[in-house]
Image: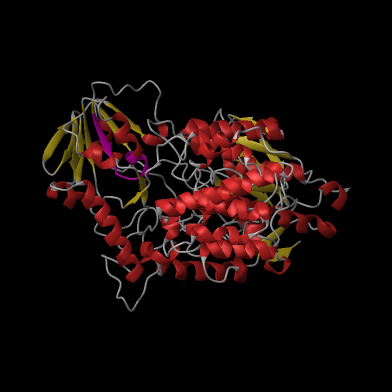
Amino acid sequence: MSGPPVSDEELSAHLAEADVPALMMTLAHLTGDPSVLEPAALAPGWLFSEQGGLSAAQQEAAREVAFDQLTRLRSEGGWRWPDPPDFPLLREIAGWALGGDVDELLPLLAEEIIAPGADPRSPDWTAPRLAPEREFHVAVIGAGFSGLLAGYRLAQADIPFVIYESATELGGTWAHNTYPGCRTDVASHLYNYSFAPRSDWPEHFCRREVVQDYLREFAASTGVAGRIRFGTEVTELRWDEAEHEWRVQLREGGTARHHAVISAVGQLNRPHVPDIPGRDGFAGTSVHSARWEQGIDVAGKRVGVVGTGASAFQIVPEIAGTAAEVAVFQRHPPWLRPTPNYRSPIRDGARWLFENLPYYARWYRFWLFAPGLRGILEGWVVDPDHPPTERAVSGPNERLRASLSQYLRDQLAGEPELLDAVVPRYPVGAKRVLRDDGRWLTALRRDDVRLVTDPVERVEPRGIVAGGRRHDLDLIVYATGFQASGFLAPMRVLGRGGAEMPARDARAYLGIAMPEFPNLFCMYGPNTNLVGQGGSIVYFSECAAAHIIDAIRLLLTDGKRSMRVRREVHDRFNDRVDAGNRERAWGFSAVGGWYNENGRSATNWPFSALEYWRLTRRADPSDYEFL
């Protein structure tokens, strides 16, 4: 493939908007020469710095090398898509980026740096070839990222399936959450399927409607959209032991039968509304952020926002200045991660490179992935010799606290009262760390916005009472999160011998399989929430889908009718996960929240992304019992 028509001046202008580390890794790949990386020697901590912490002179030198090499390649026949890097070249490039020994990461990275159209995790078998006489069909519950992916993988394996979606639109959380300012806090180039990347994202962290459009396009182009039954809610799953099938009860009436079920309802789908005295007696309008009604108009209204988590963090700056006043009711302030480009568009030159320079988008994705592969998780690990406290759980955690505290101080110089109110009194990582471009504290400093740190006592018809004072309101927004540990709720699930799925505090092997529930698989299930390990939940869903499809392959082999994870395998895995979570900031701290409910985390994955990838690559038949 020859390079796109572009003048030297245009190329130079495009390169000026490149992410230099991603550009240099791309260059090493295209030329096959890792020595081109030398002008951009990376300092310790580069993964957490803009442009890798490179000086302006280093960046300029790197761009000059890139210009020279790219114009040379163009003159020699154009820019071509070479093969993905072999392990020796991948080792050189990844070692430059990450430092140290990277051999254990190479197989994972080889699935990331792939040519257009490649899909290394796709099944290499089909049901008609494997079991030509076998009738086997699957129910997928939910049409968000995980459900659409499950459907696509089933289609690749030529397994009949249907996706039940209770809403009238696909997208999962991106269909439900329509509040002002809603956007992803995972970088756009990470927040897509690895085998179906989008190169023309308009923003570094896209708005919800853009993410939903991506899902619509994926579902339509793959044919998965035609397998979705919208407006169809599953109310009960009941295992038929005699027939080795699941009976799927639908709210709209009727029962369907399926040989296997994949639950893709996720963790963040059922709103949590706190049980505040008098809540139902409010005379104005009240709404949960995840059930925002499009007719709501905040203009000229007195708005109370309960909570300062991820949703409130996006809502408050969006409505401040339109509402007459905003009262923000805070229980625990969030730690903020500096992200200057959080609401920034991707500049034209960078978009040109994503769309035209071979492999640049892939290496940029790796650059976004890299901090989680090396460095972030280590900051949450409890060091018993530190010793851990509610200030910090380790030396690295203390350094994170110092850095993020300074970020807050820099924005609030001369405002000691507000600063005292927004510096968290718990370790970094004990609750979700939020990306920030400065707009949160800018909003809190407005004259028409007030931060209320007194505990909420009750709701009265005219407003919320906190600290003995009533705050008169026209609209209350409950930005109070989700019932994250109720994984399959409100469905009732009855397995072998009538065993009933617990309403909360669920456990599963790999977040996927449970002993008393044969042929039932979960995606984004218990203990699969990422907390800085790199990638995104989309990546973890790809890992889970690979395991589930391979498990179905085992099930179809030799006439097996049902499979369930062995109790000892399940329990051993969960004991290790629980022990790991106790040794993380969220497990140590008493601050609570959805990362840690009642002393246990049912949501978080405490280990590396590499470990989850390894564990889910294949389904080990010795982990399961078959009938």
Check residue 308 for magenta coloring.
yes
Between residues 529 and 500, which one lies in front from this camera angle? Answer: 529
Q: Is residue 504 above or below residue 441?
A: below
Is residue 520 visible in the rendered structure shown here?
no
Q: Residue at x 57, y 40 (%)?
A: 353
In the image, taking residue 233 as reference, residue 547 lies left or right, namely right
Q: Residue at x 48, y 45 (%)?
A: 187
Where the C terminus falls, by quadrant? bottom right
Check residue 165 for magenta coloring.
no
Return the x and y of residue 538 as percentages of the image width and height: 56, 47
Between residues 211 and 190, which one lies in front from this camera angle? Answer: 190
Quarter of the image where one finds residue 6? top right
Return the x and y of residue 148 as percentages of the image width and height: 63, 40
**Residue at the outermost left position:** 468
Where the N terminus falls, by quadrant? top right
In the image, taking residue 225 as reference, residue 588 lies left or right, namely left
Between residues 188 and 130, which one lies in front from this camera angle? Answer: 188
**Residue at the outermost bottom position:** 385
Part of the protein shown in magenta: 303-313
Between residues 310 and 337, which one lies in front from this camera angle? Answer: 337
Is residue 532 visible in the rendered structure shown here?
yes
Quarter of the image where one finds residue 355? top right
Q: Residue at x 26, y 50 (%)?
A: 333
